[in-house]
């Protein structure tokens, strides 16, 4: 009996690792590797977001949910997308154990999501992903929706402002859909 349990546990571990590798590879190729937003940038993100309770925020590539938690503390409703299994599981655990309210975590490729309900979109993605998202943002976002991008700009879309107050090199770009 103990042998079957060990074999089952090993098989489960292998399946989880394979699932992680596949989802992490897809996320890496299509959007970004896991790289957390610097905590030094949090004040600048909140200043640019100017969130009001009840507003809807989409976080694209939520990683370990550090920004999800920050945004949820404003009273906003946060929909966080993560497509890499390990960060998704870490986020799920953090959200549950920290009793974050107003957070919906989705194990989903955000390129297939509908952005029409967002008041704000936050992302820290690669230039390739930002280029791919530009037309999706133009087509789906309602007028007035803000986009905050850590580090990488949206190509061919002029930023309303660029904040470097927290660091000499990293930038936070603010956009708004007209």
Image (cartoon, grey):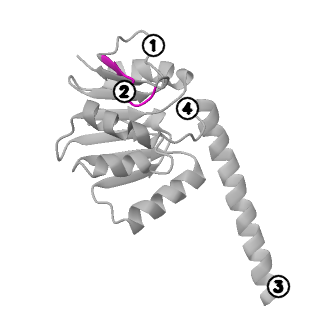
Number of other residues with Cα within 10 Å of mark 3, as a class: few under 14, some 14 to 19, many 20 or more? few
Q: Which residues are magenta?
A: 161-167
Q: Quadrant of residue 135?
A: top left
Quarter of the image with the C terminus is top left
Disc 4 and disc 2: Cα gap in Å?
A: 26 Å
Residue indicated by mark 4? 31
Q: State the SS at label 4.
A: loop
Residue found at the very far bottom of the displayed protein: 1
Mark 4 or 3, nearer chain start: 3
Q: Image quadrant of residue 15?
A: bottom right
Q: Residues within 10 Å of mark 1 (few under 14, many from 20)?
A: some
Residue at the disc numbered 2 = 165
The dot on residue 155 is 1
Q: Is residue 119 visible?
A: no
Secondary structure at badge 2 equals loop
- The relative height of residue 109 versus residue 5 in the rendered view (above or below) is above
Q: CA distance from mark 2 to mark 1?
A: 22 Å
Mark 3 or mark 2: which is in front?
Answer: 2
Q: Measure how far apart labels 4 and 3 are at the Cα level.
A: 41 Å
Residue located 44% across and 61% down the image:
94
Q: Position of residue 109 (x, y in %)?
A: 50, 40
Q: State the quadrant of the N terminus.
A: bottom right
Q: Nearer the viewer, mark 4 or mark 3?
A: 4
Q: Return the x and y of residue 155 as percentages of the image width and height.
A: 45, 13
Q: Residue at x 73, y 74 (%)?
A: 9
Q: CA distance from mark 4 to mark 1?
A: 15 Å
Under tag 3, what secondary structure?
helix
Report which residue position mark 3 lands on.
3
Among the two numbered marks 2 and 1 on one chain, the one whose residue lies closer to the N terminus: 1
Q: Is residue 96 left or right of residue 63?
A: left
Viewer-nearest of discs 2 and 1 = 2
Q: Looking at this view, is 109 or 35 the one in front?
A: 35
């Amino acid at each position: 009996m103990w042998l079957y349990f060990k074999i089952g546990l090993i098989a489960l571990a292998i399946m989880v690792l394979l699932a992680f590798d596949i989802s992490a590879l897809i996320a890496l190729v299509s959007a970004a590797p896991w790289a957390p937003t610097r905590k030094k940038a949090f004040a600048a993100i909140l200043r640019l977001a100017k969130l009001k309770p009840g507003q809807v925020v989409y976080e694209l590539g939520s990683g370990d949910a550090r920004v999800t938690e920050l945004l949820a503390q404003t009273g906003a409703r946060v929909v966080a997308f993560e497509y890499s299994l390990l960060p998704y599981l870490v986020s799920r655990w953090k959200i549950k154990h920290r009793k974050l309210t107003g957070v919906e975590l989705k194990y989903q490729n955000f390129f297939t999501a509908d952005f029409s309900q967002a008041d704000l979109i936050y992302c820290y993605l690669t230039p390739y992903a930002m280029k791919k998202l530009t037309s999706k943002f133009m087509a789906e976002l309602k007028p007035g929706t803000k986009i905050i991008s850590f580090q990488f700009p949206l190509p061919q879309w002029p930023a309303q402002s660029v904040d470097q107050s927290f660091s000499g090199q990293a930038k936070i770009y603010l956009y708004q859909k007209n």
